[in-house]
Amino acid sequence: MTASPLTSASRAPTNRDENWKYANLRALSKISFDAAVDERTTVPIAADLPASTTACRLVLIDGQYSASLSDALPSGTELSIDTRSAEVETDESVDHHYLNLNRQGRRQTLRLHVMQNQIVQLEILHVATRVGQPAIEVQIESGAELTLTERHIALGTATAATNLALDIQLAEHAKLHLARWQHFASPATYIETLNLGLGASSECDLTQITSADRSDTVVSSRSTVFVKHAGEGAQLHWNSAVIADGQQQHDAYVRIDHQARRAQTHQLFRGIASGRSKIGFNGHMLVGPSAYGTHSGQSLKTLLAGSEAEANVRPQLEIYTNEVTATHGATVGKLDGDMLFYLLSRGIDPDTAESLLKWAFVSDVLTHLPSAELRHQIEASLVRQLPGAMAARESSTQETAR
């Protein structure tokens, strides 16, 4: 029996809503996020999990913390698990609809606290087997530095569904190196709401990769992101890449709100759409009237590698002060014909030549990953979609060693 859908303070978004024009709402409408989870069938054995990229890993199964599969936290950090119901969000904006559902339906909230002046590295692994609504809150205190790898995988043959609520707050002079990898080997529907707050002189380097193992893996994802530069001199480097194939659909709305003086944002997005896949990215830069000396830059590029593929990128600038430097650029195009001809003339077969050009296109993002081990894992995972990826990396490594 299917459970009745949760109610929300906001109405469900539709494709008529400006920030949801390219989201796969049909897939989301089929999910009942309050469906009961049978824990006996959702806990995978340790052999099913990918290798960790850090000495400490926290594992969540369908949104629930697994103590048996998680490591002990390093010194300088605290973890608490709150099983009480979250206070219902009253914001009626359609952009908060799935956050409202998470607040009402979450079974626990993980709170991670990085203490003042500590340097910490850890990984959070999300495993989806059925339906889950994970909720994570991260507080990074003054002078602390956190390197966090967040991975999302789906296991099993049934379509897994995730509705994540992630809240990260940086105090003054705090640093965050955040690598987010959504890698799907099984069918999955994924939606998330990310809130990121930056204190005075804080720094955040965020790199996000979205991909699937095979073109026939049915995957749909939507990211709704709200970033606030709350403190003077805060810096954000946002780098993301999406590699889609088959009939996969990936959409993101990222609003970055500059409310303090001398804030900086550098945003880089690269997307490759092959087959009949669809990619959407809406980058909304807001500069408030008191954000003097703000600098924001956007570079949004997508590559169409299929005759039926679609890509939509939209840079937005909303500025309320004259003392600001803002640049933006967005392109949707096909593979460079001249470069493809050059590779073919060197005896490289067409499939390998195309994959090499695709690899070069997304490598701008991969270079920002904070861990060499994580980068190698991601590169290896892209072999099926970009057969030239490993060859390009090995060639580059050999040239560097000479």
Image (spheres, rainbow, N blue to C red):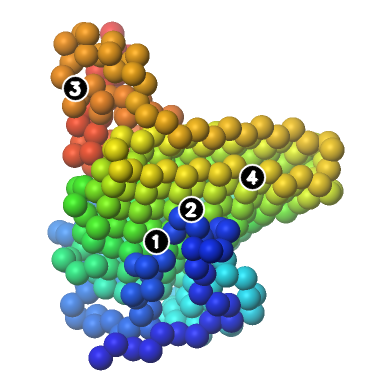
Give residue 350's mark.
Answer: 3
Asked whether residue 139 is in view, the answer is yes
Q: What secondary structure is marked by label 4?
A: strand
Residue marked by disc 4: 316
Between label 1 and label 2, give the one nearer the viewer: 1
Mark 1, residue position: 24
Callout 2, which amino acid?
Ala
Q: Which residue is drawn at 19% across and 31% down?
A: 387
Type of amino acid under label 4: Gln
Give the quarter of the image for residue 31: bottom left
In front of the other: label 2 or label 3? Answer: 3
Q: Mark 1 or mark 2: which comes first in sequence?
A: 1
> Disc 3 or 4, which lies upstream in sequence?
4
**Who's the residue at 50% across and 68% down the image?**
14
Confirm or deny contact between disc 1 and disc 4 (CB under 8 A).
no
Could you say whether the residue bearing mark 1 is in a helix, strand or loop?
loop
Relative to 271, is 322 on the left or the right? Answer: right
Q: Do the residues labelled 1 and 3 touch (CB within 8 Å)?
A: no
Labels 2 and 3: the sequence-earlier one: 2
